[in-house]
């Protein structure tokens, strides 16, 4: 009797594992590949990003989404500036799905570097439905190529290292993610894990070897500020703001070149990012694609 029950339990466990493996295989969406193109890298940008004051004057915070649609025969761009939300019932979900259906894209892009998602509805009550996951789902469903809008991490790091020392750049990338994930709760284990991950790139390896060294670098560059451990956002400090702005400019210009290159190649490009990216990049995109200028766009 015991042996019979053992066989049944083993068979049941085997079937459960097989079902889980099948479900994962059907619902897992691999990380969006970076977009690499020699033609994109040499695109000249004749305009600039909106500054933050210009951004706020054009579209005050909290009034997203912000949409930019440009036809450039035979290609087209629908650039959806979304509110970052994990709420699967957020109205922008149905809005994005409708615009996807009406636009009929041939290529899709989203924020985020080399990250995969479990996109089955089973996971939504626990993980939510941030907009990159929704784009993954739509692209996979319709067999549309999917790319990341982000520049390669090593490229962004290399450009920042031209202006700031390696320990400061390493601190910037590590703390930026740490503050988002720790939510104000000191967590040295999390900091150590993120430090190892964020410095595993040419130019940053060995720049900061431990959490204790993070303290030293922080105190050297920001002696007037409290510890980094319990923060939830970037400090209001000119040096940190300069690095953050430079990082956003590197990312923004890469996004613009990516979108322009694909549209010029005749693709119908559907891209979803945070609202501010679209607002700040609008002048560049309009100029590069020959679209009418925005009302506030300088000549």
Image (spheres, rainbow, N blue to C red):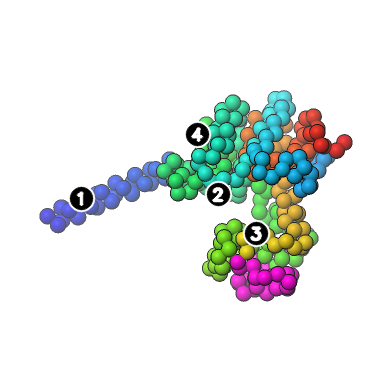
Q: Earlier in the sequence, mark 3 or mark 4?
A: 4
- Camera-near label (1 vs 3) is 3
Q: Earlier in the sequence, mark 2 or mark 1?
A: 1
Residue assigned mark 3: 233
Task: State yes or no: discs 1 and 3 in contact (Cβ < 8 Å).
Answer: no
Asked whether residue 151 is drawn in magenta, I would say no
Residue assigned mark 1: 8
Residue assigned mark 2: 115
Q: CA distance from mark 1 to mark 3?
A: 53 Å
Q: Is residue 68 left or right of residue 142?
A: right
Q: Quadrant of the N terminus?
A: bottom left
Can residue 194 be seen from the camera position used here?
no
Q: CA distance from mark 3 to mark 4?
A: 36 Å
Please give the label number shown on residue 208. Answer: none
Q: Earlier in the sequence, mark 3 or mark 2?
A: 2
Q: Is residue 266 left or right of residue 28?
A: right
Q: Secondary structure at mark 2?
A: loop
Q: Residue at x 60, y 49 (%)?
A: 113
The residue positioned farthest toward the left in the image shown:
1
Task: State yes or no: discs 1 and 4 in contact (Cβ < 8 Å).
Answer: no
Seen from the viewer's position, the closer of residues 251 and 82 is 82
Q: Earlier in the sequence, mark 2 or mark 4?
A: 2
Q: CA distance from mark 2 to mark 1?
A: 38 Å
Q: Is residue 82 above or below residue 263?
A: below
Question: Hey, which quadrant is residue 253 in on the image?
Answer: top right
Mark 3 packing: few (<14 Cα in 10 Å), some, or many (20+)? some
Looking at the picture, how far across and down is residue 116, in whole percent?
Answer: 52, 47
Q: CA distance from mark 3 to mark 2?
A: 23 Å
Residue assigned mark 4: 141
Task: State yes or no: discs 3 and 2 in contact (Cβ < 8 Å).
Answer: no
Residue range in magenta is: 205-230
């Amino acid at each position: 009797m015991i042996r019979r029950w053992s066989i049944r339990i083993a068979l049941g466990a085997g079937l459960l594992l097989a079902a889980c493996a099948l479900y994962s295989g059907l619902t897992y969406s691999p990380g969006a590949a970076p977009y690499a193109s020699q033609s994109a890298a040499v695109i000249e940008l004749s305009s600039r990003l909106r500054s933050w004051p210009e951004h706020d004057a054009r579209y005050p915070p909290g009034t997203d989404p912000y949409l930019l649609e440009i036809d450039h025969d035979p290609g087209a761009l629908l650039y959806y500036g979304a509110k970052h939300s994990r709420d699967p019932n957020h109205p922008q979900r149905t809005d994005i799905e409708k615009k996807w259906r009406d636009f009929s894209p041939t290529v899709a892009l989203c924020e985020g570097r080399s990250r995969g998602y479990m996109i089955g509805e089973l996971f939504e009550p626990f993980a939510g439905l941030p907009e990159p996951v929704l784009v993954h789902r739509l692209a996979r469903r319709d067999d549309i190529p999917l790319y990341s809008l982000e520049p390669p991490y090593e490229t962004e790091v290399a450009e920042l290292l031209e202006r700031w020392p390696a320990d400061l750049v390493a601190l910037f990338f590590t703390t930026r993610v740490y503050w988002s994930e720790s939510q104000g709760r000191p967590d040295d284990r999390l900091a150590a894990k993120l430090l190892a991950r964020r410095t595993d790139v040419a130019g940053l390896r060995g720049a900061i070897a431990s959490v204790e060294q993070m303290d030293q670098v922080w105190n050297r560059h920001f002696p007037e500020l409290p510890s980094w451990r319990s923060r939830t956002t970037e400090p209001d400090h000119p040096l940190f703001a300069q690095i953050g702005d430079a990082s956003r400019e590197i990312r923004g210009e890469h996004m613009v070149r990516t979108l322009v290159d694909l549209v010029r190649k005749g693709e119908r490009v559907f891209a979803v990012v945070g609202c501010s990216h679209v607002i700040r990049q609008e002048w560049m995109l309009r100029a590069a694609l020959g679209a009418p200028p925005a009302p506030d766009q300088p000549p």
